[in-house]
Image: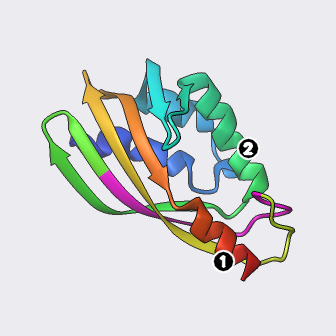
């Protein structure tokens, strides 16, 4: 199994999450003690992330996370993705307009014993806000 195949269920869970068993997908690829580190120093565990992804499915029903580039270096996996979606209501302080967004995301996964043990990630949400206000 390649490093990307290990984390591929995460990107599957992030694509139209309301239509998937998010918990099963994420539990299949993330260790029980997995941590997610955001750009503002925020951290969440696997259980919180499962809830967050389910929430994305409600807020952005057509959400997609499409990996564009994958780089492997030892136990690290860097994935540059394009995230797209159309919020179903107000989103990040922007009133619902029916407009969609397209942003870049960068994830740096650490893999150990066939599972993700942590990820550091950055999403360009300010570009999404600007596009939604457009």
Task: State the residue in front, 58 or 91.
Answer: 91
Q: Residue 101: which disc?
A: none
Colouring method of the image: rainbow
Displayed quadrant of residue 45: top right
**Furthest residue in direction bottom, as rendered:** 134
Q: Answer whether residue 47 is visible to the viewer in this image.
A: yes
**Furthest residue in direction top, as rendered:** 33
Q: Is residue 99 left or right of residue 42?
A: right
Residue under the image location 75 percent in, 77 percent down:
133
Task: State the residue in front, 68 or 43.
Answer: 43
Q: Pointer 1: what residue?
A: 131
Q: Which range of residues does the magenta coloring cover?
A: 79-92
Task: State the residue in front, 123 or 86.
Answer: 123
Task: State the residue in front, 9 or 66.
Answer: 66
Alpha-carbon neighbours of circle 1 within 10 Å: few (<14), some, or many (≥20)? Answer: some
Q: Pointer 2: what residue?
A: 55
Magenta span has 84?
Answer: yes
């Amino acid at each position: 199994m390649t490093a990307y195949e290990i984390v591929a269920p995460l990107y599957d869970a992030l694509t139209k999450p309301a239509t998937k068993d998010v918990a099963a997908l994420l539990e299949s690829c993330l260790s029980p003690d997995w941590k997610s580190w955001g750009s503002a120093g925020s951290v969440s565990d696997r259980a919180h992330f499962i809830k967050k992804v389910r929430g994305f499915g409600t807020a952005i029903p057509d959400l997609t996370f499409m990996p564009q580039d994958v780089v492997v270096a030892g136990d690290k996996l860097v994935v540059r993705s394009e995230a797209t979606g159309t919020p179903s209501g107000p989103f990040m302080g922007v009133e619902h307009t029916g407009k969609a967004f397209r942003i870049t995301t960068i994830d740096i996964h650490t893999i150990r014993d066939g599972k993700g043990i942590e990820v550091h990630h950055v999403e360009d949400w300010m570009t999404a806000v600007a596009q939604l206000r457009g």
